[in-house]
């Protein structure tokens, strides 16, 4: 026998629900007519709008069994089935041995015409003694103790196989059952989906309440319309998008925590009903909108019909999400372009420094009396550059041209910081900066630019960015203390950062004190991130104040006036006199 009706997840009985396989048994009340009508209906067009029911209800109303005897035989260890003539006439194509306390399948002789066989609610441990029933279409072994699928190889006409609530650990031995339409294996101990790819006519597969941790290996199930995977331990799903007819998928009560782990569902064009309730993902605030955004074709979610308003909201959110993705992609491209540009500027800087170093070395060698051939010096990079400067410049120019395919400089405004990479970036100071942007800049960073080139744009800097108080120098060839003198023309500098990389001047022990002395009118607060103290100022004055006073006193007045100008000269002389008197007073104490 097969079930007379189905029940839904909510427990309500559903009427007129077509599960893909529709079996109709009509038996006349008059025994002498023996009329039995058996129909296999594959028309899926009669599916109602509600969720296709997927848990088979075990409710059999048959009154068979009153005239069935199981007789023991001395020739066999199996009982032999005997039915009365009246029983055979009334139920010629079906047999129910439900709740007979069977531990083995009995021998069934003379019943080769059977199509429906029911062994529900027994204690059978192995499928056997039914190989002769080759016309069998439905076999129900629900609620037994079967540990292995076997003994079915001759049942090539079998369409419905119900093995729910047994002890099966592996799906196997279904090779010859290519006509299967319904396969129910719920309530077993199966850990992996396997050995079913040949079941191209299978339309209903129930694997609920097993031990599955993932879903895959579903290729070949081209007719599958319903897949029940409720109450497993599933964390991710694959291959569902390869099921062209799948409409109903039940994933309730598993361990799915993100949509990424079931992303293949978004590629399914046939899915209309799906359930995720009982999963961690269903507890997230974004759950419903995310599912609808990625599966716009759904009609029901978690047993509830999707409204037009929910679809509209999901569509709006999907557009916003797409905009975010585009913006994120744009930012990623800009970030990558920045990285490539900076790398390119760095390569050009290295080439330039190498060229300068080699030219200087060649000049030194020209002045020496050594007759050694430069190209024979072991380990020297000079072997790659001829002594003549013409070919050297040409080779380097070609290299620079090759690199110039990518931008050779970069100007970046990030918050209150203006970063300039490469000497070409200095031209940006001639732009028409907005008042808002220019006023926002408080930090200006120079990288891969000769300090002597930077000096020429300092007047523009103090005009364009009046609030810039922090200057950073990295790879700018600061090599002498005197170069810091050029910063005196700025209006104000509160912080100065000189990166050791590419600035040899920081190797001088007293460079910070020189900066404090030379730029004392700025009242600088930090150098390289360290607070400037009063003791630092006193030490700077002690180290360089007297030397400066002596040097300035030795210069003729006209030289000082030419350097400082008519207006600044009296002020300078006054300050120098006060400094000298202060130092003299400190020493006398």
Image (spheres, helix red, strand yellow):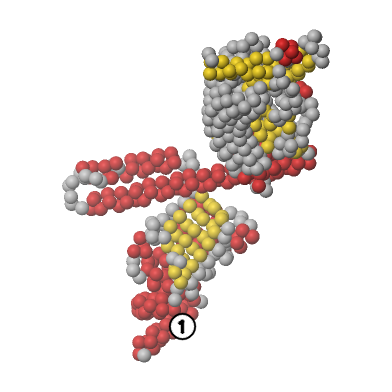
- Neighbourhood count class around disc 1 (C-alpha, 10 Å): few under 14, some 14–19, many 20 upward: few
Residue that protrudes farthest toward the front in the picture: 74
**Looking at the image, is 170 positioned above or below residue 72?**
below
The residue shown at (29%, 41%) is 384
Secondary structure beneath label 1? helix
The residue shown at (71%, 30%) is 57
Number of numbered tags placed on the structure image: 1
Nearest the eye: 229 or 366:
229
**Looking at the image, is 171 positioned above or below residue 425?**
above
Quadrant assignment for the C terminus: bottom left
Q: Quadrant of residue 275?
A: top right
From the top left corner, tell me how far across and down residue 385 is, in percent: 30, 42
Nearest the eye: 226 or 458:
226
Nearest the eye: 193 or 183:
183
From the top left corner, tell me how far across and down residue 378 is, in percent: 21, 44
Q: Is residue 154 visible?
A: yes
Q: Which residue is mark 1?
A: 574
Quadrant assignment for the N terminus: top right
**Looking at the image, is 99 positioned above or below residue 87?**
below
Q: Is residue 76 left or right of residue 320?
A: left
The residue shown at (51%, 76%) is 567
Q: Is residue 92 visible?
A: no
């Amino acid at each position: 026998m097969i079930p007379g009706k189905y029940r839904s997840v909510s427990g309500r009985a559903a009427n007129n629900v077509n599960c893909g396989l529709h079996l109709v048994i009509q038996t006349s009340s008059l025994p002498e007519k023996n009329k039995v009508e058996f129909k296999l209906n594959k028309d899926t067009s009669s599916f109602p709008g509600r969720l296709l029911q997927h848990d088979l209800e075990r409710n059999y109303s048959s009154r068979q069994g009153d005239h069935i005897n199981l007789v023991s035989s001395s020739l066999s260890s199996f009982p032999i089935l005997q039915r009365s003539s009246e029983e055979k006439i009334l139920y010629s194509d079906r047999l129910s041995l439900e709740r007979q306390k069977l531990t083995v399948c009995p021998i069934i002789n003379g019943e080769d015409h059977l199509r429906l066989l029911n062994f529900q609610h027994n204690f059978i441990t192995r499928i056997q003694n039914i190989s002769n029933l080759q016309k069998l279409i439905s076999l129900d072994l629900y609620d037994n103790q079967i540990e292995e699928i076997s003994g079915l190889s001759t049942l090539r006409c079998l369409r419905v196989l119900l093995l729910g609530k047994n002890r099966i650990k592996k799906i196997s031995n279904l090779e010859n059952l290519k006509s299967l339409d319904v396969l129910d294996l719920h309530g077993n101990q199966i850990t992996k989906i396997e050995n079913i790819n040949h079941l191209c006519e299978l339309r209903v597969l129930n694997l609920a309440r097993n031990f599955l941790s993932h879903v895959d290996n579903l290729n070949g199930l081209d007719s599958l319309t319903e897949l029940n995977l409720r109450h497993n331990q599933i964390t991710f799903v694959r291959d569902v998008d390869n099921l062209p007819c799948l409409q109903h998928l039940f994933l309730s009560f598993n361990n799915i925590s993100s949509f990424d782990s079931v992303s293949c569902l978004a590629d399914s064009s046939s899915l209309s009903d799906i359930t995720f309730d009982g999963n961690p993902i269903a507890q997230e605030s974004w759950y419903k909108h995310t599912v609808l955004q990625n599966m716009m074709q759904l009609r029901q979610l978690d047993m509830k019909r999707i409204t037009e308003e929910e679809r509209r909201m999901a569509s709006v959110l999907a557009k916003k999400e797409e905009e975010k993705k585009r913006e994120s992609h744009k930012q990623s491209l800009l970030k990558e372009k920045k990285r490539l540009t900076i790398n390119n500027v760095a390569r050009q800087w290295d080439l330039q420094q190498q060229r300068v170093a080699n030219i200087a070395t060649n000049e030194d060698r020209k002045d020496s009396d050594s007759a050694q051939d430069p190209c024979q010096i072991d380990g020297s990079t000079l072997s790659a550059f001829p002594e003549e400067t013409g070919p050297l410049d040409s080779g380097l120019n070609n290299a620079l041209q090759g690199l110039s395919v990518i931008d050779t400089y970069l100007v970046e405004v990030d918050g209150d910081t203006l970063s300039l990479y490469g000497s070409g970036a200095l031209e940006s100071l001639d732009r028409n900066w907005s008042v808002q942007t220019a006023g926002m800049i408080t930090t200006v960073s120079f990288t891969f630019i000769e300090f002597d080139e930077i000096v020429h744009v300092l007047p523009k800097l103090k005009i364009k960015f009046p609030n810039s108080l922090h200057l950073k120098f990295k790879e700018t060839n600061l090599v002498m203390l005197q170069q810091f003198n050029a910063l005196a023309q700025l209006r104000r500098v509160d912080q100065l950062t000189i990166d050791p990389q590419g600035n040899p001047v920081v190797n001088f022990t007293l460079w910070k004190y020189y900066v404090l002395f030379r730029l004392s009118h700025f009242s600088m607060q930090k150098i390289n991130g360290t607070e400037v103290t009063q003791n630092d100022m006193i030490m700077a004055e002690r180290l360089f104040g007297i030397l400066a006073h002596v040097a300035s006193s030795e210069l003729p007045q006209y030289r000082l006036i030419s350097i400082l100008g008519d207006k600044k000269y009296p002020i300078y002389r006054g300050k120098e006199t006060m400094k000298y008197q202060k130092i003299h007073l400190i020493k006398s104490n």
